[in-house]
Image (cartoon, rainbow, N blue to C red):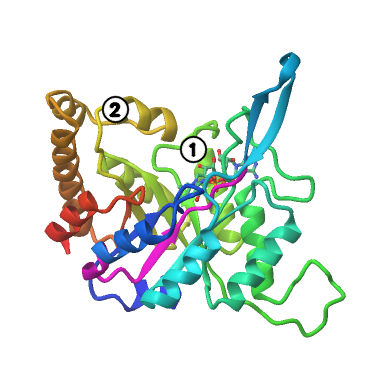
Amino acid sequence: MKVTEHIAQAEQCLFSFEILPPLKGQDINAIYHTVENLLEFNPPFIDVTYHREEYQYVEKAGGLLEKRVVRKRPGTLGICAALQSKYDIDMVPHVLCGGFTKEDTENFLIDLDFLGINNVVALRGDAVPTEVYFKPEKQGHSYASELVAQINGLNKGHYLDEELKHSHTTDFCIGVGGYPEKHMEAPSLEKDIAFLKQKVEAGADYIITQMFFDNQKYFEFVKRCREEGINCPIIPGLKPISTIKQLSLLPHRFHVDLPQDLIQAVEACSSNAQVKEVGVEWCIAQSQELIEAGVPVLHYYTMSRSENIHKIAKAIF
Ligand code: FAD
């Protein structure tokens, strides 16, 4: 079933979460463990992130540098296929512009369709770590809105080869990313919301937000989206803070602010075990307030570790 159908049929707020493929060299059992630990909360869908290639420079004799292309977390497609068939839960692979030509994208979508996976989240992806700005592939997409348009086109039977006649129409439900605190590259929140609207007009069915720690930011974002005529579901994404280091790491990596009360509570901790407790309590309070405000789904970023998410879900669902 599609994410939007799950939302339409739900009588109460749904629980869902995001997992990462394991690092190359590990097996899938840790993923099964994470999912099984959270099954009791009946997730109707689970997201799996996509991780594009990175470049590494290895020093060779004579000081020469050799550029190597590595993919640290392959396996998005395999994990989705394995979990959907093992647990009969709808899987939502993330699909990126970065590293994909339009043809790669089409072929990836055909694989998903054949596997019975008809939910995706369409994203641009970040710049590779060795580059400052995002660079699309020569025959690829520059923005997520273009990727959404391609997926939506396939839903109408439009393949890249225009000569194909009577082609199969796919039926993808398309999610896109939204940023309550603005995407780091956008000149203003207003402009970012205008681009978000382009994604919805290109065919996106729902929005899933970047993590935030202050619900007012989400409420204000939703209000502004509605004022701009974005009427689809906006699913809040939540992450419990779990280490002292994340006080600086999360703002750096995700461009989000942390509320002063949360910072003080974390700074008062003498161990990461205590920080985890603070993070769980904060996330429970955020979740409760969001449910009271009538959000359709609470979507948790697990980083593939489920203990803290289990504690939060136990208190909420
Ligand atoms: P876009 O919507 O394309 O926006 C990118 C930037 O361009 C924004 O600043 C926007 O304002 C601007 N923009 C948009 N359209 C235009 C235009 N026409 N002209 C000029 N500017 C424009 N990354 C991964 O690598 N793998 C994942 O699995 C992954 N999952 C994610 C899940 C969620 C819910 C979210 C919120 C993010 C995720 N990301 C993931 C990170 C994401 O790839 C980055 O945040 C990326 O930098 C932006 O992706 P986007 O789809 O929001 O881009």
The residue indicated by pointer 1 is 183
The residue indicated by pointer 2 is 247
Instruction: Give the secondary structure at mark 2.
Output: helix
Q: Quadrant of residue 295?
A: bottom left
Residue 312 x %, y %: 18, 53
Marks 2 and 1, how far apart at CA: 19 Å
Residue found 59% across the figure and 53% down from its top: 198
Q: Is residue 112 above or below residue 220?
A: below
Report the side of 251 relative to 184 (left or right).
left
The quadrant of the image that shows the C terminus is: bottom left
Residue 170 x %, y %: 63, 77
Q: Residue furthest top?
A: 62
Q: Is residue 234 visible?
A: yes
Amino acid of disc 1: His
| Label 1 crowd (10 A; few <14 / some 14-19 / many >=20) | some
Residue found 33% across the figure and 79% down from its top: 9
Q: Between residue 176 and residue 198, name the one nearer to us.
A: 176
Would you say the beta carbon of the disc 1 residue lies within 8 angstroms of ligand 1? yes
Q: Is residue 227 above or below residue 149?
A: above
Would you say the beta carbon of the disc 2 residue lies within 8 angstroms of ligand 1? no
Asked whether 228 falls inside the magenta stretch, the response is no
Which tag, 2 or 1, sits closer to the chain's start? 1
Q: Residue furthest front?
A: 61
Amino acid of disc 2: Leu
Tell me which image quadrant ligand 1 sits in: top right
Which numbered circle lies on residue 269?
none
Report the side of 92 relative to 57 (left or right).
left
Residue found 32% across the figure and 41% down from its top: 212
Q: Which residues are magenta?
A: 38-53
Q: Between residue 191 and residue 301, name the one nearer to us.
A: 301
